[in-house]
Image (cartoon, helix red, strand yellow):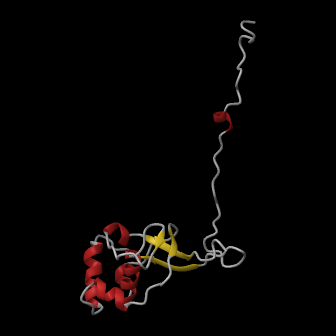
Amino acid sequence: MTGGLALGYDANSGGPRSRSRVEHISSTLLGAENGPIHCPRLLEVGLEFGLDDPLVVVRDLVRSCGYDDEVEARRAVALPVAACICRPVTVVGPPRVASLPPDTALFQALVLGLCTPWQYDPRRPLLWTRTSLRRHLSLFEGQGFYA
């Protein structure tokens, strides 16, 4: 024994790295409609553009629906009025723009322009980017989350 320690033994074999774990979350409160916390799913939005430029397609949608620009379209189309929690949809792909009626596709494009990956905010400036228009999101009511 040297200096009070036995040679050949690990003195601290229970360090934090030996106790690390990985947990996978397999449930969510989003979509819950009953109980003390409810965050019902309100809407699913997403558009598939294929090889077409999303910005060109949505500007064409604005004109084909009879609006001069996206500002006029935003004022005329009834959009959700409350902020929502967003979550990416990964199970199924969004519908092709060409398969939807123009007013339905424009509605979805307007909602996507008011979304980040995590939040829909109707007070936000409408921002159409190729990235925002290619999102596929579920929107959830978040009012019951802190109830």
In the rendered image of this protein, does residue 54 appear above or below residue 17? below
Look at the image and tell me whether residue 102 can be seen: no
Q: Camera-side residue: 54 or 15?
A: 15
State which quarter of the image contains the N terminus.
top right
Q: Image point 34% across, 77% down: which residue?
A: 126
Q: Image point 38% across, 78% down: which residue?
A: 96
Q: Image point 35% across, 76% down: which residue?
A: 125
Indicate the position of residue 44 as horizontal and vertical percent values: 49, 78
In the rendered image of this protein, does residue 66 appear above or below residue 99? below
Indicate the position of residue 80 as horizontal and vertical percent values: 47, 84
In the rendered image of this protein, does residue 99 appear above or below residue 87? below
Indicate the position of residue 60 as horizontal and vertical percent values: 25, 83
Look at the image and tell me whether residue 62 can be seen: yes
State which quarter of the image contains the C terminus.
bottom right
Report the side of 53 relative to 1 (left or right): left
Report the side of 26 relative to 133 (left or right): right
